[in-house]
Image (cartoon, grey):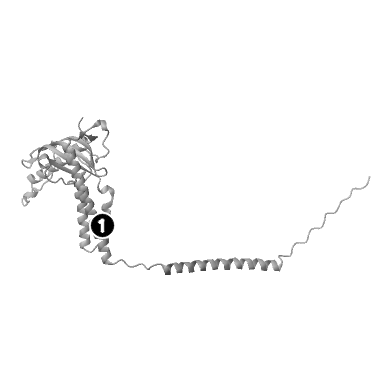
Amino acid sequence: MLPPYRIPAPPEADALDGEEPYAAVLRAQRQNARIVGMAVVVLLAGAIANVARSHSPPRRPVTEAARVDGARVAIAGARARAASAQLRFEAAIRDAIKDDVAPRADLGACPIALPAMNGDRTSLPTGRPAFPLLTVERSELDGTLPSQAVAGVLADVRRAEAHLAAGRFEEAKLYARALDRPERFGYDVVLLARATKEPRALSGREYEPGEIAGRAYVYDFATDRVVCAGDVEAKSSKAIGYVYSDRSDTPPSLGPVASMGDAIHEDIRVQTERAIVDAIRWRSGPPR
């Protein structure tokens, strides 16, 4: 047998000493070219922007006369919209009363939700109505039927005019333009009373209760029509709490009788609102 033999491995290739000098020079030249190109692009963009600005008309400062005119236009627009809303409201209420519009359960639930009452009152402070409410009797229908929602808007118009008179032009303009919000003209409630009896304080401890009965109508400014109705009955509470001053120098306006009178009138107002909320459940329509 022949003895085994080994074939020697080929020698390892010599390691590269480094990058060829001309390759490094070429790479550096390409990198410099990219940097110069980017700089040229930035300079050109800046030049174009400067040219565009130089050709645009300069912004003129807003003068005081312009601010006054802007505020006056906004206020006049708000007042005109309020006047138009009042006319539509009054016409719709008169038509609903003339046509004897009534609650109709078959037409579905009232689409307008009045504020929920918490016990005998809402969470509103004393003296504040829970919703816009106008109470009238038939003998008063020949006169104006002022929308309480429109009255609130006109009060804000007068505040805007006060800002304008005081030289607060921007505040006046913003105040008037805020009246453009659709929710400013939401809904109104009119109670046509067929029987009323005002409460009366007999002394600091006794009072004669009041009551009211009639039909309530809900007018929707979005549709310019009476959308809901309900029959209402409200009476004074059986017990009414109130406070008064018993000092010897107390004026009569703060004494027990006057304080009792204020309390019972506030109570019948709250009880009326509560009765209206309970009564307004259905859409309105002509009697069947």
Out of 48 and 163, give the one closest to the viewer.
48
Q: Which residue is drawn at 48% across and 69% down?
A: 47
Q: Which amino acid does label 1 sit on?
A: Ala
Can you give x and y, in whole percent of width and height, for residue 204 in the image?
7, 42
State the residue position of label 1. 74
Can you give x and y, in whole percent of width and height, for residue 285 in the image?
22, 34
Can you give x and y, in whole percent of width and height, for residue 253 in the image?
8, 49
Q: How many labels does the image show?
A: 1
In the rendered image, the residue lying farthest to the right is 1
Q: For the residue labelled by badge 1, is the local secondary structure a helix, a strand or a loop?
A: helix
Out of 92 and 147, give the one closest to the viewer.
92
Quadrant occupied by the C terminus: top left
Can you give x and y, in whole percent of width and height, for residue 38 in the image?
55, 66
When the figure is inspected, residue 81 is found, relative to residue 224, above or below; the finding is below
Q: Which residue is drawn at 22% across and 60% down?
A: 163
Do we see residue 47 in this rendering? yes
Do we see residue 190 in this rendering? no
State the image quarter where residue 162 is shown: bottom left
State the image quarter where residue 100 is shown: top left
Out of 244 and 46, give the one closest to the viewer.
46
Q: Residues within 10 Å of mark 1 (few under 14, many from 20)?
A: many
State the image quarter where residue 263 is shown: top left
Compared across the picture, whether 193 is left or right of 74 comes to left
